[in-house]
Amino acid sequence: MVVPSPAVRSITSPEETPFYIPATGSTSRPRRTLKANDTFAVVDSHGDIGASSGEPDGIFNNDTRYLSRFELTINDLEPLLLGSNVRDDNAVLTVDLTNPDTYIKNRLVLPKDTIHIVRTSFVWQEDFYTRFSIRNHGNHRATMSIALAFANDFADIFEVRGMRRARRGTHRAEVLGGQDVFFSYDGLDNVERTTSLHFEPQPDQISDSHARYNLTLAPHERKSIFVSVKCNGKPGDETAHFLKGMALASRARRDRRGGTIAIGTSSDVFNQILERSLFDLRMLTTETAEGDYPYAGIPWYSTTFGRDGIITALQMLWCQPRLAHGVLTRLAAFQATTIDPLNDAEPGKVLHEMRNGEMAHLREVPFGLYYGSVDSTPLFVLLAGEYAQRTGDIETIRSLWPNIEAALGWIDDHSATDESGFLRHSRNNTDGLANQGWKDSFDSVFHADGRLAEGSIALAEVQAYVYAAKRSIAKTALLLGFADQAARLEQEAETLAVRFDDAFWCEQIGTYAIALDGDGRPCEVSTSNAGHVLFGGLATPEHARRVVQGLMSPRFFSGWGVRTVAAGEARYNPMSYHNGSIWPHDNSMIAVGMARYGFKAEACRVFEGISGAASYMELRRLPELFCGFRRQKRQAPTLYPVACSPQAWASGAPFAMLQACLGLQVEPERNRIRLIDPMLPPFLDMLILRNLEIGEHQIDFALYRYDDNVSLQILRNKGGIEVSVSHLSAQDGGA
């Protein structure tokens, strides 16, 4: 019997979704992001916070906004922007500003472009630092007023996202001496949160909302103002010296270089895309008690997400395997051990999301430790198996084996409730997520006529993750000496494959259904989820061919990438979150799936599309998603208004697609690297990989494209690593 989900009221519009992120308007000032561990800052291109209403500006720590306004004026006027740049390593923001024309009683007293202000900001540990370097480039003495307006709301991240609260805690502000302002907030969760602002030198005027400096500069004279913002500090707490703190922030970025491959290509633009992606991952990767973990994205998801962290680790596994170690260890530490319906927790289930804000503490949102994802658990098992095969680190997997077995137990227990053996999901808490796959919008799972799927849902890609997880971890079980368990896992995977194809294949539309609803009816809609079936190796070769044909058709492929839903489907909307937009991480998994089945040319086309989109993005940064409109000549892709940028699995996407096109596999037990049908996309004529590691060994090699062929040149080989090139026919998907 198919087990129905608990009776819940259907959601019919986005504003009824509990955690909907509204887009309230647009701003002419682009956003800049800085981050160090659990503190991040979102400022505009001027370096201001709160200058535009409705924007997610602020300094945030552990899901709370510690500063909601920080605006600079010169003579009470908005300065003119000259330039605004985040340094390549994401450690420091530099903004160049100048004064506008200033009049007093219709008399010009300070001509424009006389005063140059360099605003330099960074985040280090829990603190935000800014230096204003002010120089008079005129030939006459200049007198001016430099003012800083600031405010604090201690808003929870879900309030910033648009949720309303009936009650809040108590907020206080006080000026301490002549250089410090102290904000405190006694939350309803009995947690005191504080923000300390320190000004150096002492302002001429200071209040709990403004600081003002009356400056007189001789020709070419320079003066500096320093401001530090400390989260959860006490009045008088020492902060780092500005230059020392900036050096430490930069060094922390450099220190994360360890264990990361260096990639150079014939394309300067693509080199910039890779460099930006790598530095974004370094910024998002956060030191936790269990190891480094890639937080999902800024501003909405700067915390531990199970699915996002696992997929990012899978994308980077070939070139940065240490990241997977931290992901596995942290998720194992927070694996559910008890039943808690409010958090959708059940023994063996792997975390979906972790939150530390006031609303999570009070359970006004269910995300303190929330387990409402159906795919995090099989993906955890998959990552464990793939990590073992990439690194040969069997001891780590041995220590995690109880967690892996608990995860497999949860998968099997929940699959057993379905007569066909599929893993389904339904929420236990009506305030939680209704859809618990990666497309978790209220309207992302629907039938051909647009009706939303109801009941307990079996998603196509989830079955593929289960299949891939069992096959991968079976190989690891063999290495650990668990031969019987390995054989059982292989048999379970094969049984699932037969059942899946019978239940999910839709001949009429030539692809796999996105899901089976609570009554076992297939949702016959053409979606990108079918590409994840290829990723997991669950498709038959013939059906894989037809899926690839569909994904590369104009209905799906916009020129920039594969849409989440094909044009023409009932709920298709290229501006929607999940029903027609383009997600880089989704495309990376599709490309990996295509390459798995031997469709390298198609994988390279997807790679080329996503890379082309990145070339138009500010900072060459791939966002969480962008709109699915058809590619037009000499036009950039259309942005999605509230996308996270940076986003971890978007940053990992180019690395996964590169591996897919190269067919690169690492075999540590043989000290060997295999390149299976390697292909370079048309925009790359040459590729150099340096410091690719197998244990303590390293290798550098170059690949050169000649039409559809690739030649290999070994540049350095430390440790006798073997490199083999194989030319195979289309894969069966299970290889």
Image: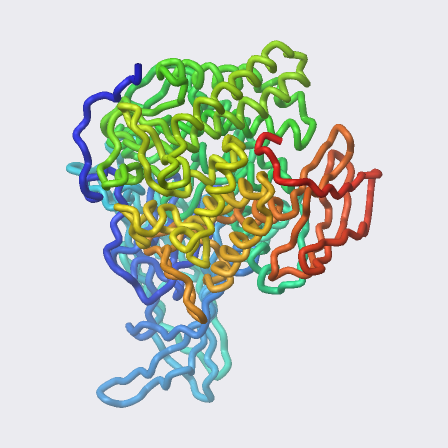
* Residue 341 vertical position relative to residue 441 in the rendered view, above or below: above
**Residue 535 horizontal/vertical position (percent):** 52, 37
| Residue placed most toward the observer, 529 or 23 | 529
| Residue placed most toward the observer, 52 or 198 | 52
The residue positioned 27% from the left and 54% from the top of the image is: 208
- Is residue 263 shown left or right of residue 467? right
* Residue 443 vertical position relative to residue 483 in the rendered view, above or below: below
**Residue 254 horizontal/vertical position (percent):** 63, 50
| Quadrant position of the C terminus in the picture | top right
Q: Is residue 139 visible?
A: yes
**Residue 7 placement: quadrant:** top left
* Outermost residue to the front: 508
| Residue placed most toward the observer, 732 or 719 | 732
- Is residue 653 shown left or right of residue 396? left
**Residue 272 placement: quadrant:** bottom right
**Residue 669 horizontal/vertical position (percent):** 75, 28
**Residue 170 placement: quadrant:** top left
**Residue 152 horizontal/vertical position (percent):** 29, 50
The residue positioned 40% from the left and 64% from the top of the image is: 45
* Residue 583 vertical position relative to residue 31 in the rendered view, above or below: above
| Quadrant position of the N terminus in the picture | top left
- Is residue 423 shown left or right of residue 385? left
The residue positioned 58% from the left and 43% from the top of the image is: 595
- Is residue 731 shown left or right of residue 544? right
Q: Is residue 204 visible?
A: no
* Outermost residue to the right: 720
